[in-house]
Amino acid sequence: MQHYTIIEQSKKLVELGLNPDTADMCYSTFGVEAHPLHLILKNKDKLMPCWSLGALLEIMPEIDNQLPSLRKYKNYYCVVYSDNVTRLGDNQWQNGKTTTEAAFEMVCWLLENGYIEKGE
């Protein structure tokens, strides 16, 4: 199971305005394998940032006193913002075949709806 965004997902996050400095991994133009960002910073102009599952979860803000949680279901994963205080249910959720895909979908939704400040 891949625990970081694929190139297409990484490009979409950048296009949506996610600050590349929040990435903790990157792809180099010399290959398609992801590397820890700190190992190849000297060639920064030849890098495509990518995000690990942990980095995606860290980016997700608190919304109305709700924090995101990652859930596993039989055939998919889900990142969900739910009201754990009043138990009124789930307010926003995004699904994926993998944990990273579910987190990616949620970060896209958060960017598209103005919950994450767009970066440079």
Image (cartoon, rainbow, N blue to C red):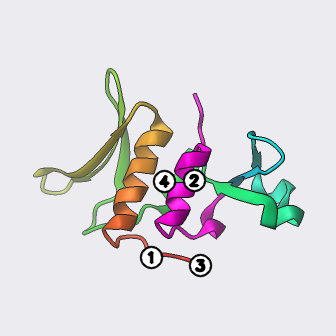
Q: Given contact means CB atoms under 8 Å apart, are the residues at marks 3 and 1 in contact?
A: no
Above or below, 108 against 62 in this view is above
Per the rendering, the mark at residue 50 is: none
Label 3 SS = loop
Which residue is pictured at 48% across the width and 75% down the height? Answer: 118
Closer mark to the observer between disc 3 and disc 1: 3
The answer to which of 28 and 74 lies nearer the viewer is 28
Q: Amino acid at mark 2?
A: Ser
Is residue 3 rendered magenta in the image? yes
Closer mark to the observer between disc 4 and disc 1: 1
For the record, the magenta segment spans 1-23
Which residue is pictured at 79% across the width and 67% down the height? Answer: 45
Above or below, 12 against 112 in this view is above
Closer mark to the observer between disc 1 and disc 2: 2
Q: Residues within 10 Å of mark 1 (few under 14, many from 20)?
A: few
Q: Given contact means CB atoms under 8 Å apart, are the residues at marks 3 and 2 in contact?
A: no
Per the rendering, the mark at residue 57 is: 4
Residue linked to disc 3: 120
Closer mark to the observer between disc 4 and disc 3: 3
Q: Given contact means CB atoms under 8 Å apart, are the residues at marks 4 and 3 in contact?
A: no
Residue 116 rendering spot, x and y as whole percentages: 42, 70
Q: Amino acid at mark 1?
A: Glu
Disc 3/disc 2 C-alpha distance (Å): 15 Å
**In this image, 35 relative to 99: left or right?**
right
Residue linked to disc 2: 10
Label 2 SS = helix
The answer to which of 90 and 111 lies nearer the viewer is 111
Q: Amino acid at mark 3?
A: Glu
